[in-house]
Image (cartoon, rainbow, N blue to C red):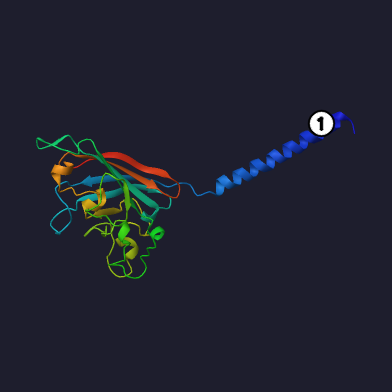
Amino acid sequence: MSPVVGVMLMLIVTIIIAAIVAGFSTGLASSATPAPSAGFDYTIHAGLAQYVSVTQQPPVIVEVTACTGQLSSNDLQIVTSYTVPATYNGVALSNAGKVITHTIDGRLENYGMSLIGDSTNPSWPSDMVWSKDDDPFIPRTHLYTTDVVPISGNGLTVGEGMNDYRFFGGKAPIASGTTWWFKNINQFLGFDVGDRIAYGFGDGSVVHITVIHTPTGTVLSDKDVRAVW
């Protein structure tokens, strides 16, 4: 076989292999599930520690304003970040400039949790529940143990069998218009907002909120939110 023929055969083999690899790669890309996209709006009431009456708003409202792709809260993490101001009502704060970073993890199954069964009072792992005794300046990840179903709104009927809807980390699909009421602001932010001298949290305080789709690492929302009283 002449050198020219040999070179041509090698070139043909190379082209065939490249085509096979390209086709395989394209197949993988097309079969992969695309990351969802979603938009979120937030309302934070600094003057409320927790929801106690049907006549009041909850401390934190999270509304899904848009959603494409398959999404549920057990796929999400909510990361909040708050910087303690220099003063509160004219009083200098000893923690001024310190940052509190807190994560709520919806992946309940990662912590041995299952919402199947007791829908109203699941057994939460104690080490994953926010405590007032925690040092808030050490970044921590917790589960959110208060139900997030609004008293009215989002079309859900709370009752037995609705456990997938009751808690952040449930597997119920999320759609545009879904609203979550986070009824305990301390659990949401990871510190005692009522201790104004320690943390200076009040009307106009700014919290940075990031929502992450954990299966893909996609950041769905990343914005500053200014609290109202």
Write down the quadrant of residue 174 in the picture: bottom left
Task: From this view, report whether residue 3 is shown above or below residue 176.
Answer: above
Residue 51 position in % (x across, y down): 17, 56
Disc 1 crowd rating (10 Å Cα; few below 14, some 14-19, many 20+) is few
Residue 196 position in % (x across, y down): 14, 44
Front-most of 39 and 127?
A: 127
Is there any visible trace of residue 228 in the rendered image? Answer: no
Write down the quadrant of residue 148 in the picture: bottom left
Circle 1 sits on which residue?
7
Mark 1 element type: helix
Quadrant in which the C terminus is drawn: top left
Residue farthest toward the left in the current orientation of the protein: 90
Task: From this view, report whether residue 105 is shown above or below residue 83.
Answer: below
Residue 215 position in % (x across, y down): 45, 50
Front-most of 178 and 52?
A: 52
Is there any visible trace of residue 27 in the rendered image? Answer: yes
Name the side, left or right, on which 153 lies relative to 222.
left
Residue at left offset 33%, top offset 69%: 161
Name the side, left or right, on which 102 lies relative to 111.
left
Q: Amino acid at mark 1?
A: Val
Front-most of 10 and 135?
A: 135
Front-most of 69 and 52?
A: 52
Write down the quadrant of residue 129 in the picture: bottom left
Task: From this view, report whether residue 184 is shown above or below residue 196.
Answer: below
Residue at left offset 22%, top offset 53%: 133
Quadrant in which the N terminus is drawn: top right
Residue farthest toward the right in the current orientation of the protein: 1
Residue 175 position in % (x across, y down): 35, 53
